Image (cartoon, rainbow, N blue to C red):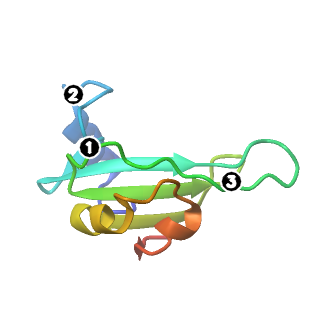
């Protein structure tokens, strides 16, 4: 997978967890990961122009995914929490261009 966590590993890591956890979506090798994703609407010519900002910093890494209309990953970017906070805390509206400044995973 994108960060080296297999499906079986993810399944084992999430055993006993709830679908909603405060601050992060999953843990891998002791690090907390928050995942944000966008896809264009089904309208012809639609593109993603706005990316919701993380609402807290209770994670170690943020992964931003850009899907196509069929939910196939087109792009994946990784941000460390301190770099994300420094880059975006004061920014009012984020776009895909902002997130492309992270480490490209795909």
Secondary structure type for disc 3 = loop
Residue at image mark 2: 17
Q: Earlier in the sequence, mark 3 or mark 1?
A: 1
x and y, in percent, of residue 50 in the image: 60, 52
Instruction: Give the left or right position of residue 5, taking residue 71 as reference.
Output: left
Residue plotted at (32% across, 48% down) = 34
Residue at image mark 3: 68
Question: Cβ–Cβ below 8 Å for labels 1 and 2?
Answer: yes
- Asked where in the image residue 83 lies, by quadrant, the reply is bottom left
Q: Could you classify mark 2 by the number of other residues whose Cα lies within 10 Å: few (under 14), some (14-19), or many (20 or more)?
A: few
x and y, in percent, of residue 12 in the image: 21, 39
Question: Cβ–Cβ below 8 Å for labels 2 and 3?
Answer: no
Q: Nearer the viewer, residue 88 or 78?
A: 88
Q: Could you classify mark 1 by the number of other residues whose Cα lies within 10 Å: few (under 14), some (14-19), or many (20 or more)?
A: some
Q: Earlier in the sequence, mark 2 or mark 3?
A: 2
Residue at image mark 1: 26
């Amino acid at each position: 997978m994108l960060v080296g966590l297999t499906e079986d590993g993810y399944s084992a890591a999430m055993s006993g967890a709830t679908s909603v956890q405060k601050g992060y979506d999953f843990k891998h090798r002791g690090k907390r990961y928050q995942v944000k994703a966008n896809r264009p609407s089904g309208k012809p010519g639609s593109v993603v122009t706005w990316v919701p900002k993380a609402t807290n910093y209770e994670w170690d890494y943020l992964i931003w995914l850009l899907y196509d209309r069929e939910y196939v990953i087109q792009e994946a970017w990784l941000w460390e929490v301190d770099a994300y906070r420094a880059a975006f805390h004061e920014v009012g509206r984020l776009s895909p261009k902002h997130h492309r400044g992270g480490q490209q995973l795909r």
